[in-house]
Amino acid sequence: MIIQKFGGIAMRDSCTRKACIRHIRRAIRENGKVVIVVSAMGRAGDPYSTDSLLSISGALGISPHAQDVAAGCGELLASAIMSAELEKEGIENELIYGSRSGILTEGPFGSADLKMELDPFYRIWGERNVAVVPGFQGTGLDGRIRTTGRGGSDLTAVVLGDMLGAELVEFFKDVPGVLETDPAVNPDAKKFESLTYAELLPLLGTERPVIQKKAALYAAKASVPLHIRNFADELPGTFVSG
Ligand SMILES: Nc1ncnc2c1ncn2[C@@H]1O[C@H](COP(=O)(O)OP(=O)(O)O)[C@@H](O)[C@H]1O
Ligand SMILES: N[C@@H](CC(=O)OP(=O)(O)O)C(=O)O
């Protein structure tokens, strides 16, 4: 069983999602069961990205609950689109979301903690090999949507990988892997083929790190093996383990 997390750039449009579906087909062939975690589609300026949803009204800034509901729509929509496009390609899958998903978020709006109840996953495995999950969010015991903080789909993927005992958690990004520095700052930065968690963590101090720091800390603590790679090709990226 493998977790595959597709970030905002990988999910941006039907063309980039076709590349994602190629990775999903390969994972079904090689790993059997696949849990797909998706982020909201695109970046600021793209209509359904997290930043665009949050900019619809300045009033969202004064209501943390309303802000989390608005932000959560991005991942919900992305999961619906991915599920439908997989179905169209003949890949049967189950959408796992909302209060029936067992994906529980508790604590403050905007930076909630994530917990999982796995029954919904075990229930589908008898019939389907592929689950599609919106990242970044869950539902509290009070029925309210809470998000886990920016970059939080990475955390959803890592926590699911830990709880479901996945062989690997793959992250599909717009970079070939973890580089010595952010390529937006230094285009000549070299890629690491592999890193330990201890080597990865100091590289995550920037405003937009290659993987969410909270997710990397969780992976280190629970020894969840990671593979950070480019959605647009088949090349190996950076493997991260103990
Ligand atoms: N050391 C690094 N190596 C690679 N990318 C990095 C690094 N530090 C920061 N980044 C940035 O991380 C971005 C990928 O992370 P992110 O945008 O959160 O991915 P996604 O939304 O696809 O999950 C890259 O576009 C890159 O600019
Ligand atoms: N969409 C959320 C959650 C997330 O993890 O996104 P991405 O995988 O595109 O970084 C955000 O922008 O913070």
Image: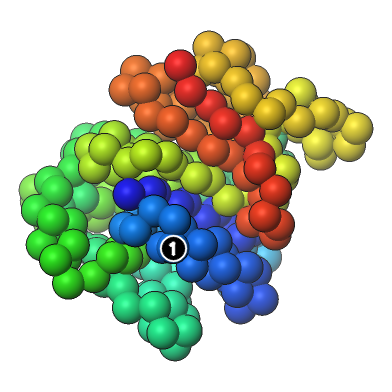
Camera sees residue 69 = no
- Tell me if 100 is positioned left or right of 224 in this view: left
Left-right relation of 53 to 112: right
- Rendered residue at 81%/39% (across/down): 184
Q: Residues within 10 Å of mark 1 (few under 14, many from 20)?
A: few
Q: Residue at x 39, y 78 (%)?
A: 91
Above-or-below relation of 156 to 132: above
In-front residue for pair 58/99? 99
Whether residue 175 is visible:
yes
In depth, the one of 84 and 65 nearer the eye is 84
Position of 113 relative to 31 (above/below): above
Q: Position of residue 121 (x, y in %)?
A: 18, 57
Residue 222: x %, y % from top left: 31, 22
> Residue 197: x, y in percent?
51, 18
Residue beneath label 1, please? 29
Is residue 165 placed above or below 181 in the rendered structure? Answer: below
Q: Residue furthest toward the top?
A: 198
Q: Name the residue: 45% across, 73% down.
A: 82
Secondary structure at numbered mark 1: helix
Q: Residue furthest bottom?
A: 88
Q: Amino acid at mark 1?
A: Arg
Q: Is residue 188 left or right of residue 160?
A: right
